[in-house]
Image (cartoon, rainbow, N blue to C red):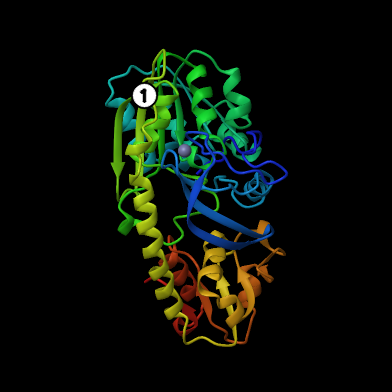
């Protein structure tokens, strides 16, 4: 969910388009699994390939989205800042993700010490770790989120990514990376930097999406923002090769919109495991099965829109809409009058040639054109909100529910 490591880690594709390097083993040959041509709000069109390393089996974007494009995406779209009342945030119980992180650490029996979080956003996890006895600090590339961490929780946060901030840390008892590693251009370099910043026996605590159970993965799982798709095998291999011993590893298939894997690994003096390419084929099998199933999921979504013709609106100017346009071709078939989004940062941009507009501009439209709700995660909530705002149910097109 956070963006550590995006700003200054080195590109894996040079200016001449040299091949990408695997984020685990460093070799450069891939088998393609899926391609997407995505029109992103304000960022133009980008062709993505998701593939598997033929040497080690790690699933990843091949090559990754250019780093400058990803950085602009995070700066303009995904700021991960808080909107709730500060008092309410301070007294709120830990969210389920924080509970999983606290629980997996507590169950190792380690005594609280100094913990540093990479990509700590507004500090909501660290706030709860401090309540559990830890001394907390972190880094965060978004200056606004870092400022909120200070204002809301009085947590000291360095503005920057892991590549610039971790080398200034030493002797830490624990490093927390929650939904960060899958966003990084060079995860192996990142865990190596974490190893250097930890005290002997220090803990690296991670949660990332897990490539498992293809039947539970939602449409759009191969995401623009996610450069790496770990399984228990590939994550353990990455950590082992960087000098970590895995103490706890938990897969939660239904904890979030996709399965997640949480790991606590302990720093050891030397690499504890070599990569075993022949054994790391699980993630690729999941990714291939999922790619097949995803095609069918988008075909069902397209069928929900089969009766539409002429002018229409789409709700949501995010990556899901880029994928909807890619997989269903409705941008060519319908006259899209606007893509509606609540985020003022997106207003005035275009996505696939269609202007992004605010809700007020949509509600002012008197044509009665249908609105397609483009979200897997929040579809019901958005449709209910539109209904409450006076949009007749006949005009609201949902794709999943
Ligand atoms: Zn590899």
Look at 46% across and 78% down and name the residue there. 397
Q: Residue 18: give x, y in percent of width and height.
A: 65, 43
| Front-lying residue, 342 or 217 | 217
Look at 42% across and 74% down and name the residue there. 299
* In this view, 355 is above or below 393: above
Look at 57% across and 60% down and name the residue there. 318
Report the residue marked by disc 1.
Answer: 273
Q: Residue 32: give x, y in percent of width and height.
A: 49, 54
Q: Residue 349: give x, y in percent of width and height.
A: 71, 63
* In this view, 252 is above or below 133: below
* In this view, 109 is above or below 220: above
| Front-lying residue, 226 or 146 | 226
Residue 261 visible from this viewpoint: yes
* In this view, 343 is above or below 106: below
Asked if residue 268 lies left or right of residue 165, the reply is left
Question: Where's the C terminus, which quadrant?
Answer: bottom left
Look at 49% across and 37% down and name the residue there. 181
Mark 1 Cα-neighbour bin, 10 Å: few <14, some 14–19, many ≥20: some
Q: Secondary structure at mark 1?
A: loop
- The total of numbered circles placed on residues is 1
């Amino acid at each position: 969910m956070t963006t550590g490591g995006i700003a200054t880690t080195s590109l894996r594709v040079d200016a001449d388009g040299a091949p990408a390097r695997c984020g685990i083993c460093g070799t450069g040959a891939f088998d393609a699994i899926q391609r997407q041509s995505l029109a992103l709000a304000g960022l133009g069109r980008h062709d993505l390939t998701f593939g598997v390393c033929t040497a080690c089996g790690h699933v990843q974007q091949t090559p990754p989205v250019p780093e400058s494009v990803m950085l602009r995406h995070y700066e303009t779209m995904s700021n991960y800042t808080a909107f709730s009342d500060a008092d309410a945030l301070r007294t709120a119980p830990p969210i389920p993700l924080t509970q999983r992180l606290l629980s997996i650490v507590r169950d190792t029996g380690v005594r609280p010490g100094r913990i540093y979080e990479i990509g700590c956003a507004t500090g909501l996890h660290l706030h709860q770790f401090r309540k559990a006895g830890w001394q907390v600090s972190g880094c965060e590339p978004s200056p606004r989120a870092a400022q909120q961490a200070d204002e809301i929780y009085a947590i000291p946060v360095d503005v920057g990514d892991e590549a610039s901030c971790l080398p200034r840390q030493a002797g830490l008892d624990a490093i927390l990376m929650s939904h960060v590693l899958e966003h990084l251009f060079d995860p192996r370099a990142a865990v190596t930097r974490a190893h250097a910043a930890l005290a002997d026996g220090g803990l690296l605590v991670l949660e990332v999406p897990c490539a498992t159970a293809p039947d539970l993965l939602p449409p759009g799982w191969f995401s623009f923002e996610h450069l790496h798709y770990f399984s228990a095998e590939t994550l353990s291999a990455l950590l082992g090769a960087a000098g970590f011993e895995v103490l706890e590893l938990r897969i939660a298939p239904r904890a979030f919109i996709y399965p997640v894997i949480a790991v606590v690994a302990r720093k050891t003096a030397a690499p504890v495991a070599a990569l075993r390419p022949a054994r790391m084929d699980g993630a690729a099998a999941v990714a291939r099965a999922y790619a097949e199933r995803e095609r069918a999921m988008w075909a069902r979504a397209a069928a929900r829109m089969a009766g539409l013709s002429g002018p229409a609106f789409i709700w949501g100017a995010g990556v899901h809409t880029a994928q909807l346009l890619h997989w269903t071709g409705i941008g060519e078939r319908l006259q899209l009058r606007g893509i509606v989004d609540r985020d003022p940062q997106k207003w005035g941009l275009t996505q696939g040639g269609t202007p992004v507009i605010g809700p007020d501009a949509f509600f002012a439209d008197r044509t009665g054109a249908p609105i397609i709700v483009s979200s897997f995660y929040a579809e019901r909530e958005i449709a209910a909100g539109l209904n409450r705002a006076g949009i007749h149910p006949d005009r609201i097109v949902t794709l999943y529910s």
